[in-house]
Image (tube, rainbow, N blue to C red):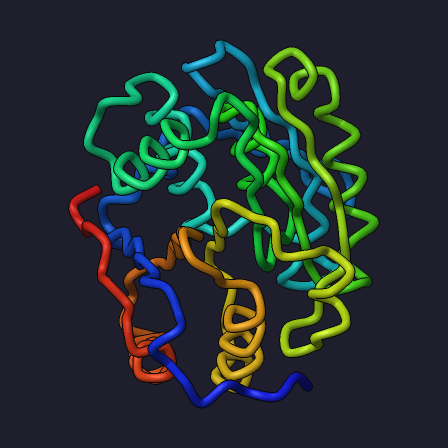
Amino acid sequence: MAAQDDNDEDINPITMILPDGHNDVGANSLSSIIQEGKQEQQKHFLPSINSTVVIRQLPSEGIGFQLWPAATTLVSLLDQYRCDVAGSTPLSPALSALSNGSNSRPLCILELGSGTGMVGIAAAITLGANVTVTDLPHVVPNLQFNADANASILAENGGTVYVAPLRWGHAEDVELIGREFDFILASDVVYHDHLFDPLLQTLRLLLSDGVGVRVAERKTGVCDGPFEKMEKGVGVFQEGEEAF
């Protein structure tokens, strides 16, 4: 595990996006699931580009192989941002500021705990960004499968997706993927309290001046304790809007 920095002042603000359980943007007709034996095909239509992202889920393999509610919400917010860049989604201020200061180069985005890769792939497509999707080594093959399955739509929209293993708390993994990111995304990434400290260690290794972070988590009350712990560990969390 990487050594933990005691100086919390150096960590950038992180905005939490906490969709209410009864008002989930992702729970709409834009998504559909087709079951094929042990695997499921998740389709999500993106109105902003009039195209559909297709993701393979493998529920029997564990939680890292499934799409979770906050991820679908984040995909919908990315789609809304592309439809209306000047809009008022929780992503708009940070993404607009980054885009204005990027000198026309593509944004470089890192997704933590990517799972199926839906969020990272959607970010690459809707933002025309270079996105690195990451998860534990055993999840990487399915991530690569999903990136390859959406290669055409990525190319059409100027996006690229790189797949890499990243174990939280392991400094050597961070060194391999680098730290040159403009933005970090995560959704429904922690289901067990003992994973928060490694996540914080990885964020400390990754964050530098100007890097924005958005974490989408379903507001169910189950994770309130761990997120309070995470907030204290970072010291500068800002709660995102909840009315969507």
Front residue of 86 and 120 = 86
Q: Position of residue 84 (x, y in %)?
A: 28, 19
Residue at left 40%, top 57%? 215
Residue at left 69%, top 63%? 62
Q: Position of residue 161 (x, y in %)?
A: 69, 35
Residue at left 37%, top 83%? 233
Depicted 185 relative to depicted 156: above or below: below
How many numbered discs?
0
State the image quarter where residue 8 is shown.
bottom left
Location of the C terminus by quadrant is top left
Residue at left 48%, top 50%? 185
Q: Position of residue 155 (x, y in %)?
A: 69, 16
Depicted 99 relative to depicted 153: above or below: below
Front residue of 123 and 43 = 123
Depicted 3 relative to depicted 71: above or below: below
State the image quarter where residue 172 is shown.
bottom right
Depicted 120 relative to depicted 135: above or below: above
With 24 as the anchor, is 53 left or right in this view? right
Q: Position of residue 181 (x, y in %)?
A: 56, 48
